[in-house]
Image (tube, grey):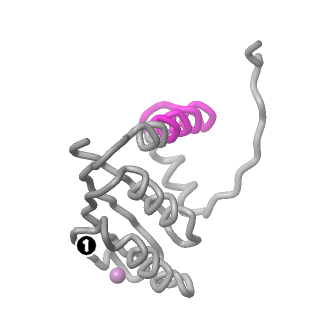
Amino acid sequence: MAKKGVSRISVSLPPDLLDEFDSTIKQIGYDRSKAIQVSIRNFLTENSLMRGAKGVVTGVLVMIYDHEVKGLEESLTDAQHVHGETIGSSMHIHLDERNCLEIIAVKGEANSIQSLARELMSKRGVKQVKLAIVKS
Ligand code: NI
């Protein structure tokens, strides 16, 4: 039986992220609860699409991270070396004083690319990872 009503949760966010979130949802006309529900649904859709891919796929991983987090760059490089057989090329762009954008072209078994994406996402200081699969 489906649960009814709502569950209340408490989340911790960096203040600048919350400011940007509040100003964006104000423009759209959402309240925080509505915007978080939409965001969670989008997150679930993205991740289920990622899990659903099978066989050899081609795509791009786009990642933003904070290069001032100690040990992060080394750990991201290690992860890319472990999955070196699926990485065709990568591009690094220094966005501002703290943030780096990395674009990684991938081709290989879907599960290997998914495991690379999960590994990158799990690291502290990685702010966003998007995986776009263009051919499967
Ligand atoms: Ni950089």
- The amino acid on which the numbered mark 1 sits, given as a three-letter code, is Ser
- Residue 44 sits inside the magenta stretch: yes
Q: Quadrant of residue 17?
A: bottom right
Q: Relative to residue 4, is residue 45 depicted above or below?
A: below
- Residue 93 drawn at (x, y percent): 27, 76
Dot 1: within a 10 Å radius of its alpha carbon, few (fewer than 14), some, or many (20 or more) residues?
A: some
**Which segment is the magenta one?**
25-45
Q: Quadrant of residue 128?
A: bottom left
Q: Residue at x 45, y 45 (%)?
A: 24
User: The C terminus lies in which quarter of the figure?
Assistant: top left
Q: Relative to residue 121, is residue 5 depicted above or below?
A: above
Query: Taking 128 as reference, is 87 left or right?
Result: left
Q: Quadrant of residue 125?
A: bottom right
- Residue 107 drawn at (x, y percent): 26, 58
User: The N terminus lies in which quarter of the figure?
Assistant: top right
Front residue (pair 119, 3) = 119
Q: Confirm or reject: label 1 Cβ below 8 Å from ligand 1.
A: no
- Residue 19 drawn at (x, y percent): 54, 55
Most common SS among magenta residues: helix
Q: Residue at x 52, y 33 (%)?
A: 41
Q: Residue at x 58, y 33 (%)?
A: 37
In the picture of the structure, the residue carrying the numbered disc 1 is: 90
Front residue (pair 38, 82) = 82
Q: Residue at x 27, y 49 (%)?
A: 57
Front residue (pair 46, 16) = 46
Front residue (pair 17, 49) = 49
Marks counted in the figure total: 1
Regarding mark 1 in the picture, which secondary structure is present there?
Answer: strand
Ligand 1 rendered quadrant: bottom left
